[in-house]
C-alpha cells in the first residue's frame, strides 16, 4: 500500500515522502497514530501543491538573504571600548556587542548567534567577521574597534 507520511517515521521516511508499506502496518500502526494517510490521487495533488509552495517560500527567503548579504558586505561597524596601552582592551568585544552596535548604527537586527566570532576581540583594529545569513550563505562584516 502506498502512503504519504505526515510525520517522520524511523526506518521508513520523512514527512512528505510517499512510501510503500504493507497493508497491515499502514492500517494498524500508521493511520491510527496519525503518522500517514493514504496516497490517493487527491492527497498526492495536495502534497505536490504544498511542496511547490514550500519551494517558492524557500526561494524567496534565499533571495532576501542574498540582498541582506550585499547590505552587510557594504557596511562597517564602529565599536568604541575602553582600553589601555599597546592597543589591549579592558574586557572584550563579543558577538552580542557587535549585534547591538549593528542595530544602533545601521538599523539591522542580526541575532548574535549568527555572528561567527571564533574568540572575543581583545585588541583594537579592523576585523572581518562572518555572519551566517542563511544556510550556506555568509556575509563578511567589517568591524572597527577603537579606544
Image: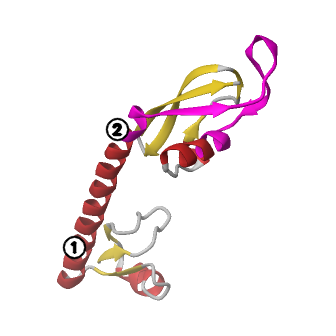
Q: Is residue 38 magenta?
A: no
**Which residue lies under the disc numbered 2?**
70
Please give left or right for residue 97 compared with residue 51 in the image.
Answer: right
Please give left or right for residue 139 compared with residue 114 in the image.
Answer: left
* Residue drawn where x is 44% and y is 80% of the image: 30
Instruction: Tell me if mark 1 has few (under 14), some (14-19) or many (20+) residues whose alpha carbon lies within 10 angstroms of its own.
Output: few
Q: Which mark is residue 83?
A: none
**Which residue lies under the disc numbered 1?**
49
* Residue drawn where x is 67% and y is 31% of the image: 80
Q: Is residue 78 above or below residue 2?
A: above
Q: Quadrant of the N terminus?
A: bottom left
Residue 70 is situated, as x and y percent measured from the top left of the image, at 34, 38
Say which quarter of the image contains residue 21: bottom left
Q: Is residue 8 above or below residue 59?
A: below
Q: Quadrant of the C terminus?
A: top right
Say which quarter of the image contains residue 137: top left
Q: Which residues are magenta?
A: 71-99
- Tell whether label 2 touches label 1 (CB within 8 Å): no
Element type at mark 1: helix
Q: Nearer the viewer, residue 116 or 15?
A: 116
Q: Is residue 27 above or below residue 86?
A: below
Instruction: Tell me if mark 2 has few (under 14), some (14-19) or many (20+) residues whose alpha carbon lies within 10 angstroms of its own.
Output: few
* Residue drawn where x is 77% and y is 29% of the image: 82
Amino acid at each position: 500500500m502506498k502512503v504519504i507520511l505526515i510525520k517522520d517515521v524511523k526506518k521508513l521516511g520523512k514527512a512528505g515522502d510517499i512510501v510503500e508499506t504493507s497493508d497491515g502496518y499502514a492500517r494498524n500502526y500508521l493511520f491510527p497514530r496519525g503518522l500517514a494517510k493514504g496516497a490517493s490521487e487527491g492527497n498526492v495533488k495536495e502534497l505536490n501543491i504544498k511542496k511547490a509552495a514550500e519551494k517558492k517560500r524557500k526561494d524567496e527567503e534565499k533571495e532576501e538573504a542574498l540582498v541582506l548579504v550585499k547590505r552587510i558586505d557594504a557596511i562597517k561597524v564602529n565599536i568604541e571600548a575602553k582600553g589601555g596601552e599597546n592597543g589591549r582592551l579592558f574586557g572584550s568585544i563579543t558577538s552580542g556587542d557587535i549585534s547591538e552596535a549593528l542595530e544602533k548604527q545601521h538599523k539591522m537586527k542580526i541575532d548574535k548567534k549568527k555572528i561567527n566570532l571564533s574568540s572575543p576581540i581583545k585588541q583594537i583594529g579592523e576585523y572581518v567577521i562572518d555572519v551566517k545569513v542563511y544556510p550556506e550563505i555568509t556575509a563578511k562584516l567589517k568591524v572597527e574597534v577603537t579606544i
